[in-house]
Amino acid sequence: MKKITFLGIETSCDETAAAVIQSLNGKPKILSNVVLSQIKQHARYGGVVPELAARTHIENIDKIISKALQKSKLDLKDIDGVAATTGPGLVVCLNVGSSIGKSLAGFLKKPFIAVNHLEGHALSPALIHQKISYPYLLLLISGGHSQFLMVKSFDQYVQLGTTIDDAAGEAFDKTAKLLGLGYPGGAKLEKFAVGGDEEAFILPFPLFRKAGSNLSFAGLKTAVMRIAENLKIKKHKKDLAASFQKIVEKILEEKTKVAMEQFRAEMGFNENFPFIIAGGVAANKKIRARLKQLAEGKKFTPIFPPLELCGDNAAMIAWVGIQKFKRKKFDSLNTKIRSRWPLDASAPFLKGPGLKL
């Protein structure tokens, strides 16, 4: 019986998180998964303030790690290794979790694993759905990232498409702010849109039928801003929220169709390829339902993480740590953090003005 136990640490943005995950003969078990949200601290500013987030991490990280260990009913001596997010993310925030992770690993004389936050999301469904086979198609949609990836095997990613400007989650947050719903706005906008007339406003579909499976949300966000400036009645704002929700669903649906074609052109027409949708925006119920229906119609198997694993958490970081530990992919205690760390290092960087797609 092979048992591996890892402590995971996540501080890439505004959640302070720690978790203890165990792998027993390859099967995951979440012994603890503690997340401290900083929503209240940042709400008054309408978004994340990096320095405030980092300071809050520093004030709470020791307590969160202690709580995770307490809930797991284990001690530090029972840990086989420490995994911490070292990118991508906010540098001042990454530095907190990475530093304490390396310090603990050094003190315990146990391996340290530097984890890519995006890979955490990519592998998060495996914590619940244990029979995910390679290759699979991945849609990663969050506040900072929106991209389609072909996952050929562990640590082998091919980017099929990505946002050329804003991420889907960012568009949700900015639209919610324009409608006076507060921060963070994704869940609030989804709830507010219920009962609104989704046909009330015609909103743009950036990159419609061009640029492959690449995405764009900046123009949509600007269109919403121009309309929202002249709305005073709550009913009209509700209609705009519903119209926004619908067009994002449509964008993701149409671009997913293209990504599925790209995937099948490379991998063939096996009907059992998994389609994993991960990241914070994957918690949106209407988006989940629409992509689930699409996947089943296109002969893919749709897989979503449970809602509690869609957002940032340390369980997914610990799980990646275990996978790298099994393959003896250890990292130096001198490992540097990275604000940008693409899963497919060979993919072109597509953000910026004047792109020709």
Image (tube, rainbow, N blue to C red):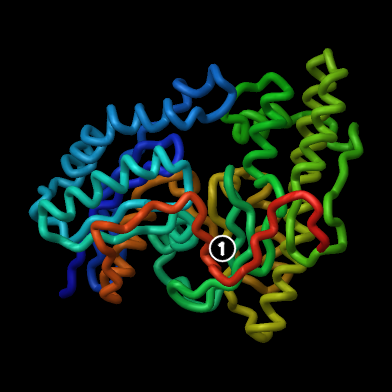
In the picture provided, is 156 more to the left or to the right than 70? right
In the picture provided, is 303 more to the left or to the right than 215? left
The x, y position of residue 26, in whole percent, is: 29, 71
Q: Quadrant of residue 350?
A: bottom right
The x, y position of residue 76, in whole percent, is: 12, 50
The x, y position of residue 270, in whole percent, is: 63, 84
Q: What residue is rendered at 10% in x and 54% in y?
A: 108
Q: Nearer the viewer, residue 245 or 184?
A: 184
Q: What residue is rendered at 86% in x and 57% in y?
A: 208
Quarter of the rendering occupied by the C terminus: bottom right
| Number of marks in picture | 1
Q: What residue is rendered at 23% in x and 56% in y?
A: 82
For numbered disc 1, what is the local secondary structure?
A: strand
The x, y position of residue 20, in whole percent, is: 25, 51
Residue 300 against residue 197 in the figure, above or below: below
Q: What residue is rendered at 8% in x and 53% in y?
A: 77
Residue sitting farthest toward the top: 232
In the picture provided, is 267 more to the left or to the right than 108? right
Report which residue position mark 1 lands on.
276
Q: Amino acid at mark 1?
A: Ile
Q: Quadrant of residue 179?
A: top right
